[in-house]
Amino acid sequence: MTHPDVEAQLDAYLDGELAAVDARELEAHIAQCADCARFRDGRLALRAAIKARVPAFQAPHALREGVRAALKTTARRSLWGWWRPLALAASLAVVAVVAVVAVGSWRLALQRAAGEALADDVLTSHVRSLMPGHLTDVLSSDQHTVKPWFNGRLDFSPPVYDFAGRGYPLIGGRLEYVDGRSVAALVYGRRQHVISVLLWPTGRGPTAAAATQTRQGYHLLHWTTPDYTYWVVSDLALAELQDFAQLMQQADSASARSLPRSYDQSGKQPQRADPPHDVLAALEQQHREALLGQFFRGRGTPPRRVMRRCICCAHATAFILT
């Protein structure tokens, strides 16, 4: 028996539908093959997870009564006469309605279970990062160092902001693996607290989780923009964590408004509102500090104030080296 044979027959074996001869042959192969044994264990874990998280629905009382009515109709043909087709149709209608309700409840339960599983993954990744040596893969408070670090490591370029002026300095970034995919994780600080921001492009995973959750003493915030799905987790006080999330959302909104827009049918470019003044001021200060730092370290010439658009974060103005 080969590996493809095991993969093709394993589900039938676990369901007890495989012939005895084939079952013995499969068991003998698994006992000698570590890869197939791991494949079997994975399927068993998947079945256990489905059984634990997908609710089992019992037949509603209305369904049982409908079936009994249908049986009585068959037993009393002479009494029902021409009413039998109508009774059967009514029973089938009841069955159809109950089936629709059951399917809808089942899908809702699956969505909730997927959201809960995703929240568990996010929390686990944050707790794991708090272990020594796991907090960051790139340690830097410069967003123009952290953002390019993700190039080639992810199939998207995550937005990176620094809110040091608001008391939430950028610490660095790392890669995480959540819900079967690689995602970006940004790390921020608030006094002695660590904030993890996990994000990935919108549409790549379930988004049915609640906006705010508290688990094991950690707060989890979740929101979705047209471009990205965000999860923020920390043991910071909920009010402060919500303030941080609001800063993230404002920065995202300012970034979206600062990007070029297409022309409308009249040939005129639509007017664009300016980003909030405090966000622009913070970004300008970040660019100034980074460039002055390069100059004083002997790595550049004195910066001259020139209005340009930052190629990294696409925000409004910047001090650049010329």
Image (spheres, grey):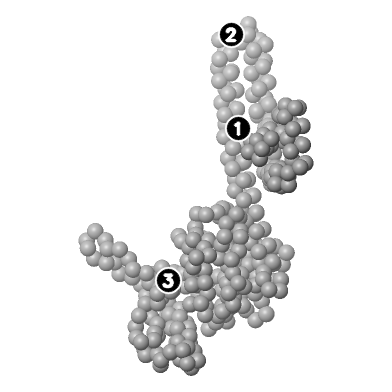
- Dot 2: few (<14), some (14–19), or many (≥20) neighbours within 10 Å? few
The tag earlier along the polypeptide, 3 or 1, is: 1
What residue do we see at 65% from left, 19% from top? 69
Instruction: Check disc 1 and report the residue beneath it.
Output: 98
Q: Looking at the image, which is closer to me, 73 or 171?
A: 171
Going by the image, does 209 lie left or right of 16?
left
| Cα distance in 3D space between marks 2 and 3 | 74 Å
What residue do we see at 56% from left, 26% from top? 93
Q: Amino acid at mark 3?
A: Ser
Q: Looking at the image, which is closer to me, 15 or 152?
A: 152
Instruction: Check disc 2 and report the residue beneath it.
Output: 81
Residue 237 percent across, percent down from the top left: 66, 73
| Cα distance in 3D space between marks 1 and 2 | 27 Å
Residue 184 percent across, percent down from the top left: 55, 65
What residue do we see at 35% from left, 80% from top? 308
Q: Amino acid at mark 1?
A: Val
- Dot 3: few (<14), some (14–19), or many (≥20) neighbours within 10 Å? some
161 relative to 13, above or below? below
Please tell me the numbered disc located at residue 65. none
The tag earlier along the polypeptide, 2 or 3, is: 2
Instruction: Check disc 3 and report the residue beneath it.
Output: 255
- Dot 1: few (<14), some (14–19), or many (≥20) neighbours within 10 Å? some
Which secondary structure lies at badge 2?
helix
